[in-house]
């Protein structure tokens, strides 16, 4: 018996390993659930059946993609978007490879943060700062509706907007500096964000509040490295999230990679169970989808290994792991992330029950896509 058991264990591991990296296209229930938790960026204006992103979707069952108009790693304007007709063909082909409808997401906030640009032939809308300064909530609704109409016509069903960070710091390079906040008044932020969301919902596009628990007071950019808001953050920054969740307007919430020792002395928000499960889920009562900010941003990727970061984000409570694949490009990144998630389950570090909780939340929204 003592000799048989090690041999049996080795055989099980070999079989598991083969199943883990199988590209047969036949998905187990675990494969299906894990795949839905991964959203990834890719290169290409088209996606034929042999493309890497088609393989990520078809063979690894990833649940979503994010589109960009620029390739940051190449410092190029050639990425996913050249014009309305091209984009519609791209999103249609992407969906054709999916057994479960994809979330196709984009950052179309308005103003500076715009992936569908005027140069490419798309309608433009004001920035959040311009809308807030106007004092006209109806203008925020019209902006949201205009964006939603454009996205829906192009086959995009998720907008990573609105930003509900409070404009606490006028020299913040990534929020105030890019005119992404509606106001320095939390109540105004909540009111204008709600109008904007109502506009998005009018054309059945999902919204995503960002960046929880508040990035407006930072003096650094979490794209570039460790960002500590412990001395600048205020609980007032939670108000827009709290109000929009209470009013039933929050489809999804994106976590920030900021570190705040007032909330967690060990981990940045994206990897913090105290912040995601304790504060967002339990205290604020959010029941929708929690999605991470780009896991390749230096605030996370420079401090944690790929597998460790995924493990911590899932344990913290994230439902979807977002990999922009743009700051740094890695071929077949979606498949890599799916395989790491499955490894963590097979190693007993993450339970299938935990995966199923996220899968059920994701499918609740995906069932509304049809």
Image (cartoon, rainbow, N blue to C red):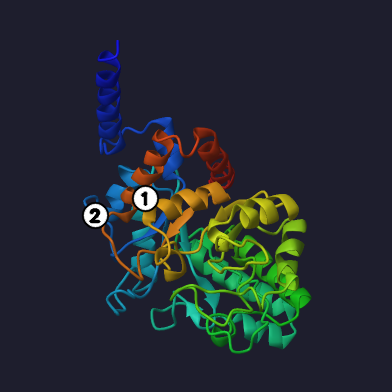
Q: Position of residue 368 (x, y in %)?
A: 58, 46
User: Which residue sits at x=53%, y=74%?
Assistant: 227
Percent coordinates x, y for residue 340 in the rendering: 36, 45
Name the element at disc 1: helix
Q: Residue at x 53, y 66 (%)?
A: 257
Q: Are marks 2 and 1 in contact (CB under 8 Å)?
A: no
Q: Nearer the viewer, residue 294 or 155?
A: 294
Residue at image location 55% in from the left, 78% down from the top: 110
- Quickly name the residue at label 1: 337
Residue 41 to residue 369: above or below = below
* Left or right: 174 in relation to 309: right
Q: Is residue 54 left or right of residue 121?
A: left
- Position of residue 274 in the picture relative to residue 153 (left or right): right
Q: Position of residue 141 (x, y in %)?
A: 68, 72
Q: Secondary structure beneath disc 2?
A: loop
Instruction: Name the N-terminal-most of marks 2 and 1.
Output: 2
User: Local crowd at mark 2 within 10 Å, few (<14), some, or many (≥20)?
Assistant: some
**What percent of the width, then of the height, locates residue 258?**
56, 69
Q: Residue furthest left?
A: 50
In front of the other: 357 or 139: 357
| Residue 51 - label | 2
Q: Quadrant of residue 69?
A: bottom left
Residue 252 position (above or below residue 129): above
> How far is mark 2 from mark 1, CA to CA?
18 Å
């Amino acid at each position: 018996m003592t000799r048989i058991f090690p041999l049996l264990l080795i055989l099980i591991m070999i079989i598991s390993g083969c199943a883990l990296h199988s590209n047969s296209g036949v998905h187990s229930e675990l494969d299906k659930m894990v795949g839905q938790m991964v959203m990834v960026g890719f290169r290409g204006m088209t996606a034929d059946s042999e493309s890497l992103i088609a393989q990520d979707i078809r063979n690894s069952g990833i649940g979503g993609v994010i589109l960009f108009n620029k390739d940051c790693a190449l410092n190029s304007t050639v990425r996913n978007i050249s014009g309305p007709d091209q984009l519609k063909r791209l999103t249609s082909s992407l969906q054709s490879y999916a057994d479960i409808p994809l979330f196709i997401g984009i950052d179309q906030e308005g103003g500076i943060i715009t992936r569908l640009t005027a140069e490419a032939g798309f309608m433009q809308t004001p920035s959040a700062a311009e809308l807030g300064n106007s004092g006209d909530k109806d203008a925020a609704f019209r902006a949201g509706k205009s964006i939603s109409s454009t996205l829906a016509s192009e086959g995009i069903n998720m907008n990573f907007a609105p930003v509900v960070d409070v404009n606490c710091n006028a020299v913040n390079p990534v929020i105030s500096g890019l005119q992404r906040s509606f106001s320095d008044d939390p109540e105004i932020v909540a009111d204008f964000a709600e109008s904007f969301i109502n506009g998005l919902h009018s054309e059945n596009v999902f919204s995503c509040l960002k960046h929880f628990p508040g990035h407006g007071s930072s003096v650094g950019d979490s794209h570039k490295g460790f960002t500590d808001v412990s001395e600048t953050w205020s609980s007032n920054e939670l108000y827009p999230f709290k109000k929009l969740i209470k009013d039933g307007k929050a489809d999804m919430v994106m976590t920030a990679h900021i570190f705040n020792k007032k909330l967690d002395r060990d981990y940045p928000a994206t990897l913090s169970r105290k912040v995601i499960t304790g504060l967002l889920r339990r205290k604020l009562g959010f029941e929708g989808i929690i999605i991470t900010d780009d896991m390749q941003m230096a605030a996370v990727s420079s401090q944690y290994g790929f597998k460790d970061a995924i493990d911590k984000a899932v344990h913290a409570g994230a439902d979807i792991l977002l990999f922009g694949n743009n700051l740094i490009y890695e071929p077949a990144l979606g498949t890599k992330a799916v395989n790491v998630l499955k490894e963590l389950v097979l190693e007993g570090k993450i339970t299938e029950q935990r995966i199923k909780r996220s899968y059920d939340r994701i499918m609740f929204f995906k069932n509304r896509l049809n």
